[in-house]
Amino acid sequence: MKNKLKKSSTDKSISGVCGGIAEHFGISSLAVRLLFLLLPGANILIYLILTNTMADNHPSLY
């Protein structure tokens, strides 16, 4: 089963959306955050939608 896109439980500044995207694609979370800041358009709206629709990633006990 393919990994689902989830919010990060460890790498988060606001809600873990950028950290989750970075973990999913294996890139730096700083790059994802800069991408959200630098892209023109409805980036705040997209972030809010992702915050409400992405599943939470519960940290593993192991």
Image (spheres, helix red, strand yellow):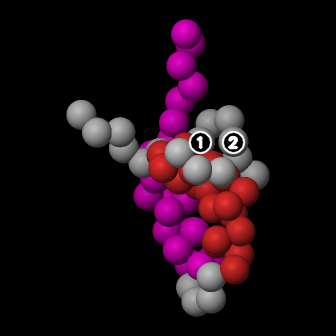
In this rendering, the answer to whether 38 lies above or below 7 is below
| Residue type at tag 1 | Ser
Mark 1 residue crowding within 10 angstroms, few (<14) / some (14–19) / many (20+): many
Check the picture and name the quadrant holding the C terminus.
top right
The mark found on residue 19 in the picture is none
Mark 1 falls on what kind of element? loop
Q: Residue at x 69, y 80 (%)?
A: 38
Query: In x, y percent, where is residue 45?
Result: 56, 78
Q: Residue at x 56, y 13 (%)?
A: 61
| Residue type at tag 2 | Asp
Check the picture and name the quadrant holding the N terminus.
top left
Horizontal side of residue 55 vs 47, given as left or right: left
Q: Residue furthest right?
A: 13
- Front-lying residue, 25 or 58: 25
Q: Residue at x 62, y 77 (%)?
A: 44
Residue under label 2, please give it.
11
Mark 2 falls on what kind of element? loop
- Is 50 contained in the magenta span? yes
Mark 2 residue crowding within 10 angstroms, few (<14) / some (14–19) / many (20+): some
Q: Which residues are magenta?
A: 43-62
The mark found on residue 8 in the picture is 1
Query: In x, y percent, where is residue 21?
Result: 53, 53
Q: Residue at x 63, y 61 (%)?
A: 32
Residue 15 in sight: no
- Is 56 contained in the magenta span? yes
